[in-house]
Image: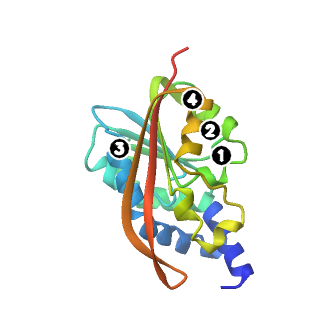
Amino acid sequence: MEDQGLKNIASQLRLPEGEYAIEIGERMNEGNHHINLYTIEALNLKGEENILEVGMGNGFFVQNILNQHPGVKYSGCDHSETMVEESIKKNIEYISQEQADFQIGHADKLPFVDAIFDKVFTINTLYFWKDTHAVFNELKRVLKPAGQITIAIRPRNVMKNYPFVKYGFNMFDREELLALMTDNNFNGINVLELEEPAQEINAMKMPVSTLLVSAEKKEV
């Protein structure tokens, strides 16, 4: 694929918009099926927890959360207006039952009051954070004391095989992600590395894995 095509893919993955936004949302659902399910399981949801997903795409996997945990209250926030619109369409039943809501917003300026969420999670968004410290501060702001944060990414050894990542993707390995969590004052850090089915990249089957890190907000 030519450079311009790769740039377009990278741009759409960062911010789905325009005529290809809906298509890219569906493609992300397919390519990120396992990392989403792994992350949902790692959240260890229970009771009537209030949770936030930052960067939920078109909201396809919200059903996997609320069907299994009907007592949970889910909020999704994305900076793509199209993804928020698609999420609302896909989850109108949950919205009507006040189990879900969706907001437009940026990770470093979330449209929520302080200390409202028991758990916050985000999947495949870390690559695009311009100021990781500012984003982590914002995630901590909306978390309750001792609330849980879960970050899911594909590690550097996987991401480097995708040809579009040279256009604006910041990649991380296990140690770098752990350092980020430590530097941003999280406690009880837990790491999972899980294999996914191989994916075809550049006409070759390549190994794929999920790197999951969960931690607790430090009580002040």
**Disc 3 residue crowd, few under 14, some 14–19, many 20+, Cα 10 Å:** some
Q: What residue did someone put label 1 on?
A: 106
Position of residue 188 measured from the top left corner of the image (x, y, whole percent): 44, 28
Q: Nearer the viewer, mark 4 or mark 2?
A: 4
- Vertically, is 208 above or below 70? below
Residue plotted at (52% across, 21% down): 218
Labelled disc at residue 42: 3
Q: Amino acid at mark 3?
A: Ala
**CA separation in Å, label 2 and label 1:** 6 Å
Q: Amino acid at mark 2?
A: Leu
Q: Earlier in the sequence, mark 1 or mark 3?
A: 3
Q: Earlier in the sequence, mark 3 or mark 2?
A: 3
Labelled disc at residue 110: 2
**Disc 2 residue crowd, few under 14, some 14–19, many 20+, Cα 10 Å:** many
Q: Nearer the viewer, mark 3 or mark 2?
A: 3
* SS state under label 2: loop
Q: What residue did someone put label 4 on?
A: 140
**CA separation in Å, label 4 and label 2:** 11 Å
Q: Are marks 2 and 1 in contact (CB under 8 Å)?
A: yes
* SS state under label 3: helix
Position of residue 32 measured from the top left corner of the image (x, y, whole percent): 44, 63
* SS state under label 1: loop
Position of residue 123 measured from the top left corner of the image (x, y, whole percent): 50, 52
**CA separation in Å, label 1 and label 4:** 14 Å
**CA separation in Å, label 3 and label 4:** 19 Å
**CA separation in Å, label 1 and label 3:** 24 Å
Report whether 30 appears left or right of 78.
Answer: left
